[in-house]
Image (spheres, rainbow, N blue to C red):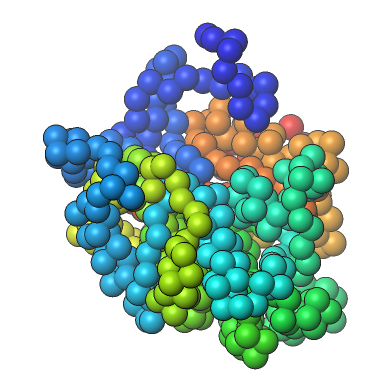
Amino acid sequence: MSDHLFYQSAVKLPTIARAEGIYAWDTEGNRHIDACSGAIVAQLGHAHPAIRDAMLAQLDKVAFAYRTQFENQPALDLADKLIDLVGGRYDRVFFSGGGSESVESALKLARQYWFSMGEPQRSVFIARKPSYHGSTMGALAMTSYTPLTQPFQPMFQLYPKISSPTQYRVPAGKSAEQYALECADELDAAIREVGAHNVAAFIAEPIGGASTGAEVPHDAYFARVREICSRHGILLILDEVMTGVGRTGRWFGFQHWNVEADILCLAKGLGAGYYPTSAIVTRAELTDPVLASGGFQHGYTYAGNPLACATALAVIGVIEREQLVENAASTGAYLRGLLEELATRHHFIGDVRGRGFLLAMEYVADRETKAPFDSSLKFGEQVTRCAREHGVIIYPRKSLMGETGDHTLIAPPLITTRAQCDEIANRLDDAFRALAL
């Protein structure tokens, strides 16, 4: 084992040897169920033959072409396909490599749009707390997750943050709808405080990701957000990096409420773990002024390269042919039911939530008060470690600003069957029973 490689922590992990479908084997021969699609990215699981064939076919043609020197057919075709899938008034696509790059691209487009429209003072972005939008500096400035942001705060602009809507921790005496509207109205107040003429955009995930654990807002929330953005004349950016490409049982998370954003951010499931691929989808009314004023001053080396785009086209093709969006909706609901059954047997599961195959369990020390475990216990990490020992991989995070509270995301590939959901739930049940509480 090499001592030269480092990532976020010094924890020693097994070495993966091979993977197929929703399973992965390490070099010790242990089989693991990938119940979180890696980082909620492996939409089709592992070693799908159609993706392999598409990538090999493109490699036989050309793997890389730089966007300022050549167009390439996979990029043109993928842009057309995304516009078809998204629908509405969207008609422009810009490619990048990963989720953070997608968010950076959206922020820069919003900023440059206002700059080109003769409103250079519009430099303020409003986001939510807690939230996670990426690890590059612009995306990190939109993020509210203390362990990730605190070391770097002197390096980026501090922007206004409003409350993320929750249907689990609704304040006493309020309905979920009342609280959702209050959270939305915080956006109105923040805009008024800063001055609408200074605000470029508001950014949010349709359904919460790692920072809130698949929190689904009340149905009233996004209608009010859209109305506020329109009334004040600011842009709405929806971060679909985790929720897009079928993950929540719709092609895109915003389709649960038909809210119309000005810019959508896509990544993760678009390349499905086979090749880094991301995009923003927007409208010509935003891009035309930017292009007319000297061009979009932004870009990445691997943006729109043919191998990435051919891979994404193949991913979308498989999802369509195998009806995996529908499977995420129906089988995801089945899996949620199994997780809810687990909650009846294990007192520390406070909430089960999510849509499709983006699900989460939040763990609490006291169900009645919803009090979290003491952060020193690192309860979510304990659960994750015990689950791994029982052959299932899940994704842990802190629910309350990254400081306290524990949840794990349960987000298996869209190809997951009901029988495999049973296996996931049974193994989690065994893991929960083995926890030393």
Q: Position of residue 80 (x, y in %)?
A: 26, 66
Residue in the image at 50% along x and 54% along y: 298
Residue 292 visible, this angle: yes
Q: Position of residue 373 (x, y in %)?
A: 81, 46
Callout count: 0
Location of residue 318 with respect to 386 vertically, above or below: below
Question: Position of 132 compared to 28: left or right?
Answer: right
Residue 113, by quadrant, is bottom right
Question: Position of 269 compared to 373: left or right?
Answer: left
Q: Position of residue 42 (x, y in %)?
A: 40, 44
Location of residue 103 with respect to 388 vertically, above or below: below
Farthest front residue in view? 294
Residue in the image at 74% along x and 39% along y: 379
Residue 329 visible, this angle: no
Q: Position of residue 319 (x, y in %)?
A: 28, 57
Residue in the image at 65% along x and 90% along y: 231
Residue in the image at 19% along x and 38% along y: 62
Seen from the viewer's position, the closer of residues 99 and 44 is 99
Seen from the viewer's position, the closer of residues 80 and 393 is 80
Question: Position of 62 compared to 233: left or right?
Answer: left
**Quadrant where the C terminus lies?**
top right
Location of residue 87 with respect to 23 vertically, above or below: below
